Image: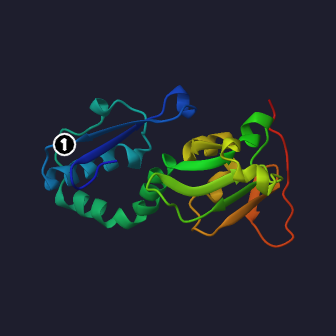
């Protein structure tokens, strides 16, 4: 991620994407014009060619992009906004019932409230049969990242950037739906 103010966030996905991403953040001394040109070059030579895991020094970036390439990149900013927002969400935290991990259960229920802290996604995930007393005991809750929750239970991906106030329930082994009165939670343990 390259930002107009010179901030640079690099996410390194080890173990072929199965490990928690490591985030490196730096600030560059480049001008905003140079940063815009670099972003256009990287988009043209990597993203547009679906090359996301190559050594950056192997990309064709010796030539400055022409004004048309830069204009095309700028016109795509709105199209990239959802991707940028989703990427920011991956490192935020979620609250998860300990029963999920300790019992080996798939997540059966999720609710997203307005977060109280900047690093919080607002999501709470549970098996779906926890009692109110269980949930109100902080020792029964764990703090994960959004990315960890998605790796643990990939079908959450469809709803992970849903608006605040959303509640979801698992309705099948590989599917969640928006919660509604009377909707039953499909409970299932993960295969080991």
> Residue 191 is drawn in which quadrant?
top right
Q: Is residue 18 above or below residue 148?
A: above
Residue at 34%, 63% in the rendered image: 77
Residue at 56%, 44% in the rendered image: 147
Q: Secondary structure at mark 1?
A: loop
Estimate the x, y position of residue 63 in percent, counting from the top left. Answer: 17, 43
Residue at 16%, 55% in the rendered image: 32
Q: How many marks?
A: 1
Q: Is residue 182 above or below residue 155?
A: below
> Residue 167 is drawn in which quadrant?
bottom right
Image quadrant in which the C terminus is located: top right
**Front one among 144 and 77:** 144
Please say whether residue 76 is visible from this viewpoint.
no
Estimate the x, y position of residue 123 in percent, counting from the top left. Answer: 61, 56
Residue at 81%, 54% in the rendered image: 131
Residue at far top of view? 15
Is residue 57 shown left or right of residue 181? left
Q: Is residue 155 above or below residue 161?
A: above
> Residue 80 is drawn in which quadrant?
bottom left
Q: Mark 1 packing: few (<14 Cα in 10 Å), some, or many (20+)?
A: few
Q: What colour scheme does the image use?
A: rainbow
């Amino acid at each position: 991620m390259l930002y107009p103010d010179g901030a640079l966030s690099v996410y390194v996905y080890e173990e072929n994407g199965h490990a928690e991403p490591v985030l490196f953040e730096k600030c560059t001394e480049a001008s905003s014009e140079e940063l815009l040109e670099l972003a256009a070059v990287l988009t043209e030579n990597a993203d547009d060619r679906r090359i996301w895991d190559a050594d950056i020094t192997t990309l064709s970036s010796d030539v400055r992009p022409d004004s048309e390439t830069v204009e095309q990149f700028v016109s795509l900013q709105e199209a990239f906004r959802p991707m940028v927002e989703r990427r920011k969400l991956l490192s935020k935290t979620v609250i998860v019932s300990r029963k999920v991990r300790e019992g080996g259960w798939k997540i059966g229920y999720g609710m997203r409230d307005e977060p109280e802290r900047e690093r919080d996604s607002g999501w709470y995930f549970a098996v779906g049969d926890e009692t109110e007393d269980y949930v109100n005991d902080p020792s029964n809750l764990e703090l994960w990242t959004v990315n960890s929750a998605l790796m643990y239970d990939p079908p959450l991906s469809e709803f992970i950037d849903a608006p605040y106030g959303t509640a979801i329930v698992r309705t099948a082994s590989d599917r969640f739906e928006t919660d509604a009165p009377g909707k039953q939670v499909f409970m299932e343990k993960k295969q080991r």
